Amino acid sequence: MLTEKFNPLKEEMLNILDYEGNIVDANLEPFIENDNLLKMYHTMVLAKVADIKALQYQRQGRMLTYAPNRGQEAAQVGSIAAIEKSDWLVPAFRELGAWLYKGVSLEQVYLYWYGNEIGSKFSEDVKMLPVSVPIASQLNHATGIAMASKIKGENDVAIAYVGDGGTSQGEFHEAVNFAAVFHAPVIFLIQNNQWAISVPRSMQTKSKTLAQKAIAYGIPGIQVDGNDVLAMYAATKEAVDRARRGEGPTIIEAVTYRLGPHTTSDDPTIYRDDSEVKEWEKKDPIERFKKYLIDKGLWSEEKDKALYEEYESYVGETFKKVEESGLVSLEDVFKYTYDEMTPNLIEQYEEYKKYLEEEGQ
């Protein structure tokens, strides 16, 4: 068991690929079908291209506030690839790679950040909750879903994502404690990207690792190199199998780094040194995975160049489509709060509608 081999109290971290993409320990390398390996890589590249473009669109005034993901592709894709189609993804707001791998279309992702709630309406076969902006509240939702699955005998698992800052919230304790007591089939995945807006990981807790918090709840916890897609897959797969056997939750700490700002409303140069960012850029999760795939004979630099060109075009075409049809009507701004608009909302809608008419808009 990986959770027994790597002790978070001793700051032992699961690592399978080194920074050059070489296998550290062949005994730890998980078996993943070649087609799935390529799907994982393709998704990571798409997430990177779409993320860079989204930041550009927002800076051009063509998209609303956006939460960048660059540098965290392995933490997201490596973990989500280890669950089944019937399992639930419960996100925060920085899991672009996981959303895309789970089956959410890029158009839906862009619609959401464009301000259109249609982007949160997924097809029935995509078991994912909408984006959750309140910090850590989604962990209780995931625990509830996992408990419902257990009670109904569906044998499905839920995986919930949260940032390092989210572990300081009461909801984190409530969700993990309840899940542990009732053996809920849920995985709590902490994307430790070192910064919660401007607050560094060192100011979140006195614990040496975030994974060791699992010990207090009587459940397994493991710290993983979050920029190592194979390590993320292996740790999550073990946690998923354990949950499906009825053995309860696991905490996984993915040690990664947010290369960009917290959101497009943030300026990270105010609170962190560029030299820190440059050091983490050397640990690029996509480059490591690419080297691994090339060594296995599954990829090449020529294929890589073609893939980036394909996704550059695809992302541009997708956003153009969103710009052409993504604007919502005034009524839509109000009617998605409840199943039916309350009298108060109707009054606000009519008042604002009148205001716009008077302003000639």
Image (tube, grey):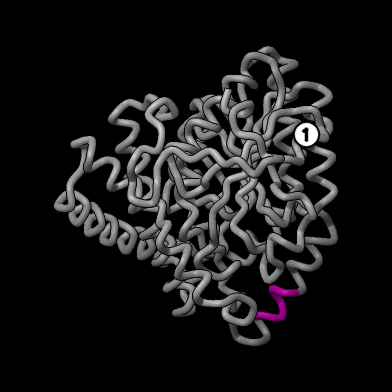
The main secondary structure of the magenta stretch is helix
- Indicate left or right for 31 with 87 as reference: left
| Rendering quarter of residue 258 | bottom right
> What residue lies at 18% left-to-right and 36% top-to-bottom?
297
Q: Residue furthest bottom?
A: 359
Can residue 352 be seen in the rendering of this structure?
yes
Q: Residue furthest left?
A: 302
Q: Residues within 10 Å of mark 1 (few under 14, many from 20)?
A: few
Label 1 element class: helix
Between 259 and 280, which is closer to the camera in this rendering? 280
Specify the quadrant that holds the N terminus: top right
> What residue lies at 62% left-to-right and 18% top-to-bottom?
244
User: How many marks are shown on the rendered structure?
Assistant: 1
Check if residue 195 falls in the magenta segment. no
Q: Which residues are magenta?
A: 352-356
Query: Compared with residue 243, is residue 79 higher up or lower down, i.e. above or below?
Result: below
- On the image, the x and y values in percent for residue 283 come to 43, 57
Can residue 102 be seen in the rendering of this structure?
no
Kind of residue sitting beneath label 1: Ile
> What residue lies at 53% left-to-right and 52% top-to-bottom?
119
> What residue lies at 71% left-to-right and 81% top-to-bottom?
355
Check if residue 355 falls in the magenta segment. yes
Query: Compared with residue 358, is residue 75 higher up or lower down, i.e. above or below?
Result: above
- On the image, the x and y values in percent for residue 214 come to 75, 36
Between 172 and 123, which is closer to the camera in this rendering? 172
- On the image, the x and y values in percent for residue 330 come to 63, 67
Q: Which residue is mark 1?
A: 215
Specify the quadrant that holds the C terminus: bottom right
| Rendering quarter of residue 140 | top right
- On the image, the x and y values in percent for residue 157 come to 62, 25
